[in-house]
């Protein structure tokens, strides 16, 4: 069943507030566009400002708000936790020194703030696709998120690259300017690089790690 049909049927059954986690990727733009067609009364669209984002994100954020005529709320990590984190990591590239450091950084800048945002929500919507990586192969449209204790909706779960590209084109949705610079997946500046033609779309994320480690802790799954 197409996501345009499936998503309204799912959200109609959910009682209480729904949130969309926006991370400036093409998938998020498509998921947001789909979700806004559903006419949800209690919807919060938010982004995690890790304080490590690319400078291009700030003008793109404004462009998106103007395009969709919505507010995308920004949440930052706790300043005291960031201070402690930076002391532990040693320097601005300290998150690359070990998997433990990287997970700690993602915990403070992403996972802990996300837990606070999702508390009290009934469901959250993501732009995840199963074909994005080995860590997402068993993705379903509807899941129970045990980590955060709420329903998780992945309307793009079975989309491939062509589906996504066709949807973006059809609805003339604004894309992150980083895609034009060779990025195929968007994350924090210290942990994301542009990729070469033929490389995997997630090859530029935490490129120094093995593929099975490439999650930030927001979407950890049982395999
Ligand atoms: S992606 Fe990198 S900079 Fe961003 S929170 Fe994770 S480790 Fe820190």
Image: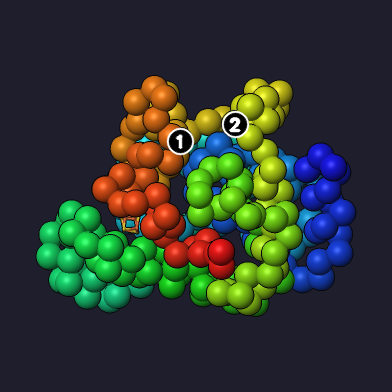
Mark toward the start of the polypeptide (2 vs 1): 2
State the image quarter where residue 171 is shown: top right
Q: Is residue 35 visible?
A: yes
* Left or right, residue 161 beside residue 16: left
Horizontal relation, residue 169 to residue 189: left or right: right
103 in relation to 69, above or below: below
Find residue 192 and report its horizontal and vertical position in percent: 33, 43
Q: Is residue 168 visible?
A: no
Task: Give the structural element (helix, strand or loop) at label 2.
Answer: helix
Instruction: Report the front residue among 117 and 132.
Output: 132
Assign the C terminus to one quadrant of the image.
Answer: bottom right
Tag 2 near tag 1, CB within 8 Å: yes
Q: In which of the image's four quarters is ligand 1 placed?
A: bottom left
Q: Residues within 10 Å of mark 1 (few under 14, many from 20)?
A: some
Residue depicted at 82% across the width and 57% down the height: 10
Say the numbered circle drawn on residue 161.
2
Q: Position of residue 76 (x, y in %)?
A: 40, 63
Q: Nearer the viewer, residue 103 or 26?
A: 103
**Residue placed most toward the observer, 119 or 142:** 142
Residue drawn at point x = 22 percent, y = 62 percent: 98
Q: Which mark is residue 201?
A: 1
Whether disc 1's CB lies below 8 Å from ligand 1 is answered no
**181 vs 46: above or below:** above
Residue 94 point in image, percent of width and height: 18, 59
Q: CA distance from mark 2 to mark 1?
A: 10 Å
Residue visible at 51% across and 54% down?
A: 135
In the rendered image, which quarter contains the N terminus?
A: top right
Look at 59% across and 31% down and name the residue there: 161
Question: In this image, 53 relative to 15: left or right?
Answer: left
């Amino acid at each position: 069943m197409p996501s345009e049909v499936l998503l309204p049927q799912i959200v109609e059954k959910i009682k209480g507030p729904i949130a969309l986690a926006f991370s400036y990727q093409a998938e998020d733009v498509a998921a947001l566009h789909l979700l806004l067609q559903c006419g949800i009364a209690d919807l919060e669209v938010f982004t995690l400002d890790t304080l490590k984002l690319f400078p291009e994100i700030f003008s793109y954020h404004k462009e998106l708000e103007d395009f969709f005529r919505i507010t995308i709320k920004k949440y930052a990590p706790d300043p005291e936790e960031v201070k402690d984190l930076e002391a532990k990591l040693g320097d601005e590239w300290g998150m690359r020194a070990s998997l433990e450091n990287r997970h700690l950084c993602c915990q403070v800048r992403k996972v802990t703030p996300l837990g606070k945002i999702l508390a009290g929500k009934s469901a959250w919507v993501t732009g995840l696709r199963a074909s994005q990586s080995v860590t997402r192969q068993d993705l379903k449209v509807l899941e129970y998120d045990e980590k955060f204790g709420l329903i998780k909706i992945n309307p793009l779960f079975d989309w491939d690259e062509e589906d996504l590209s066709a949807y973006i084109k059809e609805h003339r949705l604004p894309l992150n300017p980083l895609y034009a610079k060779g990025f195929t997946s968007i994350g924090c500046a210290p942990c994301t690089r542009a990729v070469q033609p033929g490389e995997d779309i997630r090859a530029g994320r935490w490129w120094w790690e093995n593929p099975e480690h490439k999650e930030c802790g927001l979407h950890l799954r049982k395999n």
